[in-house]
Amino acid sequence: MQQSGSSLLHLIQNDEMVPLDLLVRESVQNSLDASINTMEPVRVSFRLISHVTDAVASLLPEIAEGLKRKYSGTRLMLQIRDTGTQGLTGPVSLGGDAHGNLVKLVYEISQPQEKKNAGGSWGLGKTVYYRMGAGIVFYYSRIRKGNGFEERLAACFVENEKSPDKVMTSSKTGIAWWGGENIYADDALWASALTDPSEIGSVLLRLGADPYVDEETGTSVIIPFLRHDLLPRQAFTEDDDEADLPANALVSSPWYGGFAGYLKYSLLRWYAVRISNESYPLFAYGSKLEAVVDGEDVSEIMPPLFRVLQALFNRVYEEESDPQTLPEEIFCKPVMLRGNTFDGDQCAGWISAVRLTREQLGMGSPDNEHSPFAYLMNRGDDTVCLPVIGYLRSPGMIVSWNDEKWKKVLKGGKSGEYVIGLFVPYSSQAFTQQMAASTGCETLEEYLRSTEKADHSVWADRSGQSIIRRISTNVQNKINDHFFPVENVPADVKTNLDVSRRLARAFLPAGFGRDSRFVPESGRGGDPPFPFVFPGTNPVFRVQDFSYLPGKIIMSWTLFWGKKKCQAHRLSLDVATINLPISADIWGKDSELGEFPFAFDFMTASFLTRGKEKTVIALHLVPGEKGADAEKLIDVTVSETAIDMVNISGNSMDAWSFGGTLAIRVKKKDEDLVPVILLQADSGQGGVQ
Amino acid sequence: MIIPHIVNSVAEEAYKRLQQTGFSYKGANPELRAMLYLPLNEIVKKFTSKEYKEYTADIEAGLVLYSLFSPDKIGLRSASDEGIWKYLSIEIAPDLVYARWGDKENRFWKEKRRIWLKTVWWFIHLSWQGDEESTRKILQDLTTDEIVQLVERAGSGYRVDLNREIMKQLPAYRSKSTHRDIFRVVMKFNTARLIATEPSFSEGGTVGYVRRLFNSLSQR
Amino acid sequence: MLDRQAAARIGWMPESFRFSCSTPDVDPESNGASWPGPVTLGHQGIWNPVEHDLFLEITMRFNPATFFGAEGIACSNAALGIVLEWTSPESSQRGHSNIVPFRRESGKVKATLFLRFDRNQFRGQVQLSASFYVVEPDSAPDSAERHLANRSGLCLGSLGGTCSLFFDGNGSLFPFVEYAGLPDDALWRIRYESSDPCEDLFVADMVCLEINNRHPDYPAYKGVDGQKGGTPMERQIVASWLTMFLLILKERNPDVFECLKNDTYLKFSDGSIAHFAHYLLSTFQINRENLQNLSATLNKVVAGQFLDGAGTL
């Protein structure tokens, strides 16, 4: 299906990228592709001149009226002129299934997208020229032909045919050409380029463009009626209405200083590694690039950042970096993919990166260079200082700078420090047979090229493939690991508390657990009444009702025998401590401690309770004595520091309790020690009183 | 100064990683590491070369920690938080704790009373005599076991002044006594006395209390 | 030793019980409890034990006459003292306030006791009790009084119970922990160690939301300092965490979960994991029909709880 003006203009709707960047990338790419001889540099020159509408209109009589109506006053024209290149060779028109540079650039634009030439896919990027101005583009070229030269000139106008104020009122498609005589072939009339030198000469004069002379060959692309919104939007204030702005509104400037300035930085941004790079590896990629804007060689204004990029690139091909260019150690490592992607080693390319300070980038005075974020991405601020990684492709043009898709996974360092890196793919790396079949490409370069969007701005894996994703993950990991080694951010105690409390306020009930916001009334048990009620099964020993005689403490005692079929219990007299009590045996082990300070004085067992029934027994013993009660239920042995009671009744004493009085003698009055009686129950349970 | 703290589950996992990948410093918080490494490494080296006995290594390590993380720098709230000590043991100085104790998870995190770094810090805290030299002097003749006894019995809170006074008067008493284990005996007796008496309110205050404590023993 | 009868005999009564802080305009936000509390601090989340100190003042009244003499606890001519003792096992510390002395002749005593706690001194709780000590012994005690404690420093006992000051309580802190993981670990994870949700407490050692502060998204999760109510990412994480929490509970203890789901009787300890789950499901009326609904209602609730300024219910 034939293309129309509107569909073409839609093809590269790249709203993200600044239009001038697109233009720079495309035009320089084309020039480099056309280089004659890798040993000779390709030189691309950008020039901005002003023109009056009439200069152009007079060349295009059919639309002169329309042009004059739509465009008035002085306008800007951009001329992109390359040398050291072949020029637009081949036939001058499409008729007869022609192939050649000229027809490819100028005339095939109207052909359906699906048509592919032998030798590569059709670059849609060329449509960028038509988006830069009114839609009119002049192509002028000089080529070698035989022993001499030939010049060609043609113009093409692409306009949205649906637009209400279109200039080409008679065209249905919105695409039209000017140039030489139409050529008849294959039952159709085909537009063709002008080749007559004198006619070409007068057109160039009208346009104010320089002809090619001497041995020069090359191509010039001339774009009149340049739009004024080609720069990043911050060139304008909010009050400006774009339509009202005169052409020279372009000169309102932020850091790059206007149209020409932006072009310079754009060239550096995308082609720095190739621009006048002395060490540029010709064997790898082809000719060096010289870039000029309005007569000024871009390499002369190259800020340190771009020299760093060159150094990073060169480092991939050289063993070491040149300490003069870059005293910092460059981190350069191959990016190896896992699995069987390539024949031979699995190297997809190299990451070359370095960490620099503001000073090293010349960001302080006196140079006051702008930050890498400004130079490379038009970003104003560096509050979030992430590493900046450029992904290169074989022509040396950087495909993208760390765009949105990748930024998320990289981490940032402290502000004031920058990490700049380049990924250089190993272009000629061949795929395995399997990969080649599945991707349809023989080499990595092919695959990368094929996945680039029409504007070369991003690599995106084709569905079912993951090569690019793996490369970028690998790059990010290497950068992270090398420049941001595992660094602990201390868990700020206050932060943790803040968050914990905030979440608690939202989600925890009042009175929850040991809540420091609210604690319910805690019940406090009192002393159990006497006689004691024992709900449990364990034996328990209790004393109370203390009275004192000189050197003696007298108390009442009760022992609940317990439900656990115990045969005997021992009450041991210990010294209380803030930890565990000290028994007489342990006390005795340290002679320093001297004599054990307490002793039982006497003990009586006066009653026995079985359930609700209380029986009187009468047993009175002093240390050294042993005896049983009248009914022969228990046998008691008393020593100075222990009382042993044994069940001799022949029955179980489940839930029985005994009680009586006992006295403790305090051997040294001034001792300030406290006695305690421990119950050592036979079954292993015990209580302390 | 804020030292991060970690809970048991995190400590357990991190310790397993150490066991698998070696007890080396993994790169966390370089500032803390820089603070600790040189002084502690010196001590650990002397321990490994047998120049320092266990006890001396522990005292010296405690002194280093106490100086770097003094109570007014980190607060007793942090010092009593095992999580801090677990963090320091596992993330900041695993190689040093390992050199002292080997692969013993109790000393790194598992048993809160045995985390080495914590124990030695508290031991110094409980023995502190106002400056490093005086503290070192009175601690000369004790054993590791004795450190353990002092620190492990935190009860419901250490009696710091009392402990410091006991440590202070101990050397003089030790020289008079023939008993090998004198520190242990004093502490034992002290625990019995404390049931009824509050040292700061007794005659002569804490100093008087301790003097009487020692005197009672020597008179028996 | 003192017992309740002794306390009754001297008519011991705590009067005022006040808290303050040395930082200007900061109040310890105690719950206004009287002795013996318990006292909770930092209600509004402004006062906290890390940044702020605490002054405490309590006044007590009593008539100690009956303490002295053969029937009492001290010799007639001894001097006794009342003091506020404090212990904090979690902070491994203990100490006491000023001691206010009195004798038999003192008549009715009004004792004001002060304590100052430093910032960053305590974790957990501090227990306070009012204790009596012999300050000065009777130099010539009566023969009938010889059994009585008569040496300075001897403890005669405490009165009025123990007051707990809560500096950090489990219930006021959601189990949340930040840790330093690896950058390609997840940003958040749930840790769930409990096997007995009805007994195990809802605390960080059992169940926890862990945030990896070395993850590249951590800055986005954390947001800007001073940002109220957390970031959108935090809300999402909390909602997901709560969903996972309930799911793991269901997986490990399906019977417990069934009871929670059907709102049938379930016995659980105060502050336990099951307690929290029950609270979560019932208070916020989470739809438990199926996982989808559960997740959806949880998400809604979480957003609501945060956007409302995270108020308590």
Image (spheres, coloured by chain):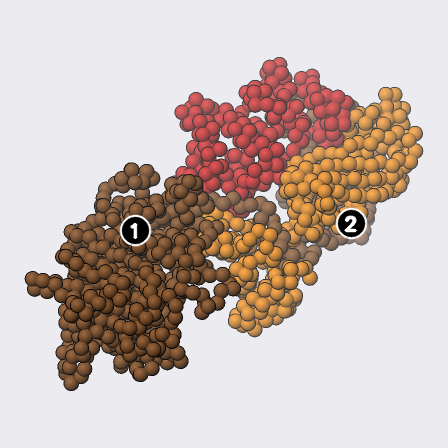
For residue C2, above or below residue A248: above
Foreground: A56 or A582?
A56
Three-letter code, disc 2: Gly
Foreground: A139 or A206?
A206
Residue ID at (49%, 64%): A240
Residue B137 image point, x, y percent? 56, 19
Residue ID at (62%, 62%): C307
Residue underneath mark 1: A296
Q: Secondary structure at mark 1?
A: strand
Q: Nearer the viewer, mark 1 or mark 2?
A: 1
Label disc, if present, on residue C32 of the rendered structure:
2
Residue A577 image point, x, y percent? 69, 32
* Residue C48 in sight: yes
Residue ID at (42%, 52%): A255
Foreground: B43 or A90?
A90
For residue B34, above or below residue B8: above
Q: Which chain is orange?
A: C
Q: Which chain is red?
A: B
Q: Give the letter of the chain under mark 2.
A: C
* Residue C268 in sight: no
Residue ID at (64%, 51%): C170
Q: Colour of chain A?
A: brown
Residue count near mark 1 (Cα–Cα under 10 Å), binned few <14, some 14–19, many ≥20 = some
Residue B103 image point, x, y percent? 43, 38
